[in-house]
Image (tube, helix red, strand yellow):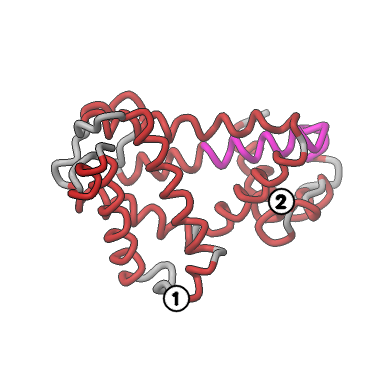
Amino acid sequence: MTTDRFAVLTDAAIDVLAELGMRGLTHRAVDARAGMPQGTTSAYFRTRKALIEAVVRRLADLDRADLDARELPAGADSAAVTLTDIDRTAAGIAALLDQWMSTARHRTLARYACLLEATHHPELRTILEYGDASRAQSRAMLAAAGARNPAQAGDHLVACIDGLLFDRLIGAGARTAPPPGTAANRADLTIAIATLLRAFAGQHPEAQRSGT
């Protein structure tokens, strides 16, 4: 499959998932959204499992492109990143989360739909492996910042940021937080993420007293 055809079909599947949910994800629906002849999607992705796995791969690729565009810590290079400027790091992460809540909201909704589907179908659990990269990046960043237990702290940081995104996008936080895509939302997210970074890096007074 050409890269362009893969992107067209999986992007269409992401849109279908965001608007109709997992029940609406069919090969025919993707064909229609992509403007392709009926049968095109099934020719490339023979099963629904293969289609979902392709969507998750596409989501992971797009997320990585977002990280690269914002020059956030990623991959092997993250070991060179420190948290000496926590507010700047937090602002970068906040801007990314704000993007995933606004212009890329459909992708975030599609990601949640895929994860929920995996809880009901063990054969899809392999898609969770795409989350390993963000945890590795977080561990390396916190190790460089001097966290006492960077492996644990890195996993906890990702979990907290994931929870923040969920709460702001579709949880109760959506009722009280500033609107996504605004400077106010990015500023509010920056405060929350800076607090998390300081705590998990051991630079927060409460974290230092608890020994974490």
Q: Specify the quadrant that holds the N terminus.
A: top right
Q: CA distance from mark 1 to mark 2?
A: 36 Å
Which quadrant holds residue 24?
bottom right
Asked whether 58 falls inside the magenta stretch, the response is: yes
Left or right: 80, with 14 as reference point:
left
Count neighbours of disc 2 (C-alpha within 10 A) and say few if under 14, some if 14 to 19, many if 20 or more. many
Give the residues in magenta. Answer: 41-60
Q: Magenta stretch: dominant SS? A: helix
Q: Which mark is drawn over residue 34?
A: 2
- Looking at this view, name the residue that lies furthest to the front: 210
Give, as a three-letter code, the residue at label 2: Ala
Q: Position of residue 38 (x, y in %)?
A: 85, 46
Q: Is residue 59 above or below residue 104?
A: above
Which residue is at the front of the view, 30 or 126? 126
Q: Position of residue 118 (x, y in %)?
A: 70, 39
**Residue under the image location 55 percent in, 53 percent down:** 108
**Residue under the image location 32 percent in, 46 percent down:** 70
Left or right: 108, with 8 as reference point:
left
Dot 1 corresponds to which residue? 176
Under circle 2, the secondary element is helix
Left or right: 14, with 162 as reference point:
right
Q: Position of residue 94 (x, y in %)?
A: 34, 56
Under circle 1, the secondary element is loop
**Residue under the image location 35 percent in, 44 percent down:** 69
Asked whether 209 falls inside the magenta stretch, the response is: no
Q: Is residue 129 above or below residue 89?
A: above
**Residue under the image location 82 percent in, 33 percent down:** 47
Q: Position of residue 30 (x, y in %)?
A: 76, 49
